[in-house]
Amino acid sequence: MEVLFILLIISALVSFLFLGFYLWSVSNDQYDDFYQAQHKIFDDKPLSQPKL
């Protein structure tokens, strides 16, 4: 029974750690590029020029 309490505490700590990383990434504008992703499909330019 003690093992369940230890695993519960460890899982709660890990989940709060991931929540903290998620909130940090949202507050640092990691997910704010809404323009480029929707227009990438229409870009017909090659990624690099072929070497001759």
Image (cartoon, helix red, strand yellow):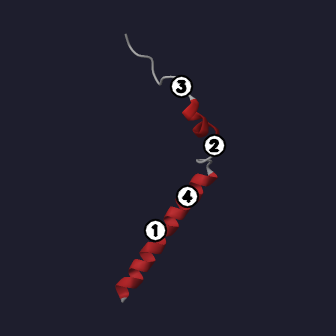
Circle 1/circle 3 CB separation < 8 Å = no
Number of the front mark, 1 or 3: 3
Question: Which residue is painted at 55% across and 62% down in the image?
Answer: 20
Image-based side of 7 in relation to 12, left or right: left
> CA gap, disc 2 to disc 3?
19 Å
Sequence-wise, which precedes: disc 2 or disc 1? 1
Where residue 22 is drawn, which disc sits there? 4
**Residue named by callout 1:** 14
Sequence-wise, which precedes: disc 1 or disc 3? 1
Where's residue 36, x and y in %?
60, 36
Number of the front mark, 4 or 3: 3
Image position of 8 with respect to 23: above or below: below
> CA gap, disc 1 to disc 3?
44 Å
Crowding at dot 1, Cα within 10 Å, few <14 / some 14-19 / many 20+, comes out as: few
Where's residue 37, x and y in %?
58, 39
Sequence-wise, which precedes: disc 1 or disc 4? 1
**Residue named by callout 3:** 44
> CA gap, disc 2 to disc 1?
30 Å
Question: Looking at numbered disc 3 in the image, what kind of residue is underneath it?
Answer: Asp
Question: Looking at numbered disc 2 in the image, what kind of residue is underneath it?
Answer: Phe
Element at label 1: helix
Question: Which residue is painted at 48% across and 74% down in the image?
Answer: 12
**Residue named by callout 2:** 34
